């Protein structure tokens, strides 16, 4: 991998704007999922390192929160500009450690940077309120203040965007951060830290501790008294554990957890639009997104036409190394991920699913899986209750609105749902009936910095992005002025 800005390839822990070794002096390898080759060894942080990071973030909080929103905004805008200036290097780094095609990686950098730009603007509008008092001698107002040190834990599927979506509102609000990135994709996180330092973000505002011991670091972040807030994206199982651990210090949490997104194609849908939207939702990042189509429900009267057109489109998808400009589907992240897809496929086929296309690993390498479609799926199959997190479209059929709403809601998850219809009355009713935090109507891509991202039910709580997102990082204080008569 040849970067123009060689400073972007870092491999140490980032504390107080310094690159430091881990206290244990241990390292772990970061590998390219497309080739299996080692990219670099990264310092493996442990308890002593994360404690140092929390100390640095606590000291920096006093300085950072005292800056005016306009000052914070200016520094964040510089950071945004540097990210965009380095977009080609960052995209190459992202593709090399995560696998997604270069064009998607570039899209992710723009998407991630847009949170920094948006919150650099939004921090100047964190308003309190004047509340009409019920008594003449008192006046009520509320003010919003930064909550304090934030512990952020981020996943490997969007190694830039998920970090930016947490750090940007936290920083904008006046908080400081200790981040634990995924051990599979720490390099983008470290590159972002280098650019934050270059932009002039003060020491200690952002600290990053890569580690292979997620449990130990998570335990410290969730139980340390100086950490006032945890923001986590990952599995529901880990989210439950972080909640339990955070109870000891009554910490505020934002949790973006698992999904099981339904895509519903009604009989009145524009079928070409539905094919395009479903394809975009399902095969983005090789199906490794929390909001991607997990169950595709077709009205029985249009299922033949949809499957024919959808299959033709899926067969066109080009599998390959993400650094090849033709590639649309890269490798999965690791062997555990591909084994899970194989397990779900085996179970579905055993229980009566029909293979339409794909259904096996690609000859390119052990982490490449063919874009796949299966139909005749039913709720007894494991993939009906679990995230597939791979390039497999699972097709179910339905005959009425009531039936499909029940099928779609029959899950513990409630992150994103999508449906396609040309009737506005149906659109309102179905949107209201679906138990999901985000709904795409005649659209498969719904994520933007300006929009609130977040789930219901066991997909977690708290919003990321939009003006709602900054509220997760402030406390609202009520001031009562007396003796006014
Ligand atoms: C995710 O997979 O959690 C993020 C996807 C997105 O932001 O669209």
Image: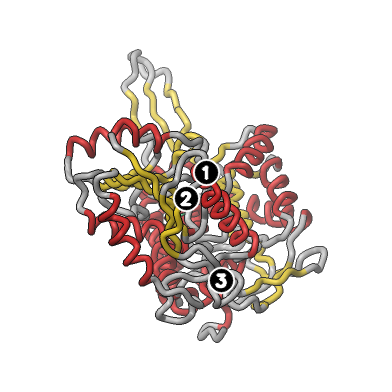
CA distance separating discs 2 and 3: 44 Å
Looking at the image, tell me whether mark 2 or mark 1 is earlier in sequence order.
2
Looking at the image, tell me whether mark 3 or mark 1 is earlier in sequence order.
3
Q: Which mark is residue 353?
A: 2
Secondary structure, mark 1, is loop
State the residue lying farthest toward the right: 24
Mark 3 or mark 1, which is nearer to you? 1
Left/right placement of residue 399 relative to residue 62 reads left
Secondary structure, mark 2, is loop
Instruction: Find disc 3 in the rendering and name its residue.
Output: 191
**Are discs 2 and 1 less than 8 Å apart at CB?**
yes
Q: Check disc 2: other Cα within 10 Å, few if <14, some if 14-19, many if 20+.
A: many
CA distance separating discs 3 and 1: 41 Å
Establish if 197 lies above or below 92. Answer: above
Residue 180, position in %: x, y? 63, 56
Q: Please tell me in which quadrant of the rendered image residue 481 appears.
A: top left
User: From this viewpoint, is residue 219 visible?
Assistant: yes
CA distance separating discs 2 and 1: 9 Å
Q: Check disc 3: other Cα within 10 Å, few if <14, some if 14-19, many if 20+.
A: many
Between 438 and 33, the one lying in front of the other is: 33
At x 68%, y 52%, the residue is: 54
């Amino acid at each position: 991998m040849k970067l123009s800005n060689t400073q972007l390839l870092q491999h140490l822990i980032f504390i107080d704007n310094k690159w430091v070794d881990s206290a244990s002096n241990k390292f772990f390898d970061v590998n390219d999922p497309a080739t299996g080759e080692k990219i670099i060894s990264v310092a493996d942080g442990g308890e002593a390192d994360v404690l140092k990071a929390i100390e640095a973030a606590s000291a920096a909080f006093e300085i950072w929160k005292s800056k005016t929103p306009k000052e914070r905004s200016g520094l964040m805008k510089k950071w945004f500009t540097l990210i965009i200036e380095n977009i080609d290097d960052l995209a190459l780094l992202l593709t090399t450690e995560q696998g997604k095609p270069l064009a998607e990686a570039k899209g992710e950098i723009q998407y991630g940077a847009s949170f920094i730009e948006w919150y650099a603007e939004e921090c100047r509008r964190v308003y309190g309120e004047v509340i009409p008092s019920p008594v003449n001698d008192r006046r009520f107002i509320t003010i919003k203040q930064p909550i304090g040190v934030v512990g952020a834990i981020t996943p490997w599927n969007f190694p830039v965007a998920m970090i930016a979506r947490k750090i940007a509102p936290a920083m904008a609000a006046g908080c400081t951060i200790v981040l634990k990135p995924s051990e599979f994709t720490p390099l983008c996180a470290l590159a972002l830290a280098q650019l934050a330092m270059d932009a002039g973000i003060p020491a200690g505002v952002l600290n990053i501790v890569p580690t292979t011991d997620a449990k130990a670091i998570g335990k410290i972040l969730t139980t340390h008294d100086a950490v006032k807030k945890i923001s986590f994206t990952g599995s529901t199982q880990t989210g439950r554990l972080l909640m339990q651990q955070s109870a000891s210090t009554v910490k505020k949490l934002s949790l973006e957890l698992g999904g099981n997104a339904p895509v519903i194609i009604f009989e009145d849908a524009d079928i070409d639009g539905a094919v395009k939207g479903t394809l975009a939702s399902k095969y983005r990042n090789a199906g490794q997104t929390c909001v991607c189509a997990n169950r595709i429900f077709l009205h029985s009267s249009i299922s033949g036409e949809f499957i024919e057109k959808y299959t033709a489109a899926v067969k066109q998808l080009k599998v390959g190394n993400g650094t090849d400009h033709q590639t649309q589907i890269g490798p999965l992240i690791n062997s555990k991920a591909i084994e899970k897809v194989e397990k779900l496929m085996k179970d579905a086929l055993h229980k009566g699913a029909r293979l339409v296309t794909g259904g096996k690993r690609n000859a390119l390498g052990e982490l490449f899986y063919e874009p796949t479609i299966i139909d005749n799926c039913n709720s007894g199959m494991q993939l009906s209750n679990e995230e597939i997190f791979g390039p497999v479209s699972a097709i179910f059929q339905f005959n009425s609105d009531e039936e499909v709403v029940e099928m779609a809601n029959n899950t513990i998850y409630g992150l994103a749902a999508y449906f396609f219809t040309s009737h506005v009355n149906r659109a309102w009713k179905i949107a209201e009936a679906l138990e999901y935090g985000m709904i795409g109507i005649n659209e498969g891509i719904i994520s933007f910095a300006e929009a609130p991202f977040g789930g219901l039910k066991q997909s977690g709580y708290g919003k990321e992005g939009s003006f709602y997102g900054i509220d997760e990082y402030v406390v609202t204080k009520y001031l009562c002025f007396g003796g006014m008569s």
